Image: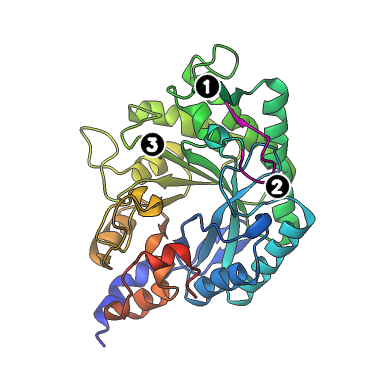
Amino acid sequence: MSSEPLALAAPLFTPLPFGGITLRNRIAMAPMTRNQSPNGVPGDDVCAYYRSRAAGGVGLIITEGTYIGHPGANGYARVPAFHGEAALAAWGKVVAAVHAEGGAIIPQLWHVGSARRAGVEPDAGVPGFGPMAIDEDGQPVVKAMDQADIDAAVDAFATAARDARRLGFDGVELHGAHGYLIDQFLWEESNQRDDAYGGTPERRLRFALEVVRAVRAAVGAGFPIVFRFSQWKLGDYDARIAATPEALGAILKPLAEAGVDVFHASTRRIGEPAFAGSPKTLAAWTRELAGRPVIAVGSVGLDTTFRTGHFTRSEAPDAKSRVDLAQLVERFEAGDFDMVAVGRALLSDPQWAAKVRDGRLDELRNFDVQALDTLVR
């Protein structure tokens, strides 16, 4: 076994302060929906799934999206809840398991917004909630949120964050990406309100700011808040919440001032330029504009760019393992990002981080479709 990959990878395996703890390396597990938690409760198999990634060397595990205690927060079958005695007790077991392996873990707190439709658990009669009402075939399927709805959602985020700290999590991540509720308020196409929450970029930012401020008040100082955002949406890869770096800064800086400690810049390919006229990635721009540490993500470790069809089975999801360590480390040492999140590669290979750390690149498993339907451990 050559020592060259180990030496090359070494910068990614340096410690990083994170709130009151120090992460053992710069490798994060990206949040990935698994649909393996019946009745919203993660079982022993889910616990073992997360534990195996910590045992495999991941520094920070970001859980799959876990829905907060608002009636319209969930939009999918068998995803985990982050409220209620049974679900929270189960998450406490996950925290203990990850910590036992030397890893750190934060939950991704999630509200799907207008992606929800009536008929989905836990209460089939509850419609979707979003910035604007949506009708389908002449029938209302999404309720435009009024002030009481907004206040209830903000409070649910804060309650979930408070519970996360009580359970021993090492921080929280707010899901503000991919066309879900927080992102729906940020994006002009999904937010055409004319009240205090829409109509201008500043007013579209208001809901996100209220969530961050409420979460900060709930957890106090020193407990990390990570904010995940994206330009692209699940139904629109070309979508933009910010057309220029200046517009992006006008979103990120107030969020940082409100209490965000780390930004998680979600892209489909980690090295893509974020704006015309500059080679800088979204992560690099975020780090510069917000003045906060950044997690970069986007098809790391694979030879194919992320597409939502991987998970809907509308296209062949298999992908070969390909780790361009030289380019990844070059971007890290240039200051593009502080951590890198790995998604699909970790679904098939719980030991991905340890293999990269030790230079065992020839042992990396390829990603395959079976990893979508099982909890590979």
Q: Secondary structure at mark 1?
A: strand
Residue at 59% from the left image edge and 62% from the top image edge? 105
| Circle nearer the N terminus (2, 1) | 1
Residue at 41% from the left image edge and 59% from the top image edge? 343
Mark 3: amino acid: Gly
Front position among marks 3 and 1: 1
**Residue that lies at the very extreme toward the top in this rendered image:** 194
Q: Taking 88 as reference, is 281 above or below it?
A: above
Residue at 47% from the left image edge and 76% from the top image edge? 56
Magenta span main SS: loop
Q: Position of residue 347 (x, y in %)?
A: 43, 66
Q: Position of residue 86 (x, y in %)?
A: 76, 59
Q: Taking 319 as reference, is 271 above or below it?
A: above
Which scheme is used to colour this image of the protein? Answer: rainbow
Label 3 belongs to which residue?
Answer: 235
In the image, 287: left or right of 22? left
| Circle nearer the N terminus (3, 1) | 1
Label 2 belongs to which residue?
Answer: 160
